[in-house]
Amino acid sequence: MQQRLQGNLASAAGIALVGLLVWLALCVWLPVRASGASMSPALVPGDIAIVYRHAPVLNGDIALIELAGQPRFLHRVVCVSPDGTVQTKGDANPIADRASSPGWAVSGRVVAVIPVGAWIQSWRQRARVR
């Protein structure tokens, strides 16, 4: 009976630990689906960008920008001003974004990309042909 109780406690502790790790991961890393073509070829529509939340950004990083009342977007940082504002640009765009984003609007930086967008696009094209 005591061994069974110890086994159940160990299982419960393991499940709690896994739950804690998943919760921490979701608080630190945020998966974001690329929806437009402005970051092509680095990101194509459908790619999953893993954003390290609240991480500082440097020139050249891809940042997640979240401004109130606007859809969030992923763009490359071209300049970080001393006052904390961030100038961004889509890789496929010929010029930088018109407006700089305030530092508080930067939700984090992309640390990894799961490149599933091209696969999704080819699958959709094959589905249309049939």
Image: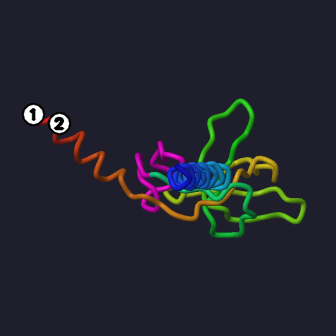
Q: Quadrant of residue 68?
A: top right
Task: Identify the image quadrant of the C terminus.
Answer: top left
Res 93 visible? no
By secondary structure, the bulk of the magenta-drawn segment is best described as: loop
Which amino acid, by three-letter code, is at mark 1? Arg
Q: Is residue 81 above or below residue 38?
A: below
Determine whether the residue tagged by mark 2 lies in a helix, strand or loop.
helix
In percent of width and height, residue 38 lies at 50, 50
Circle 1/circle 2 CB separation < 8 Å? yes
Reading the image, the residue beneath label 2 is 127
Q: Residue furthest bottom?
A: 59
Give x and y (percent) for residue 16. Answer: 61, 49
Q: Residue at x 23, y 48 (%)?
A: 122
Q: Looking at numbered disc 2 in the image, what kind of residue is underneath it?
A: Ala
Question: As rendered, which of 40 and 9 lies closer to the eye?
Answer: 9
In depth, the one of 26 and 48 nearer the eye is 26
Q: Which residue is mark 1?
A: 130
For the view shown, which residue lies furthest in the top direction? 69
- Left or right of 126 in this view: 9: right
Span highlighted in magenta in the image? 31-47
Query: Is disc 2 surrounded by few (<14), some (14 to 19) or many (20+) residues within 10 Å?
Result: few
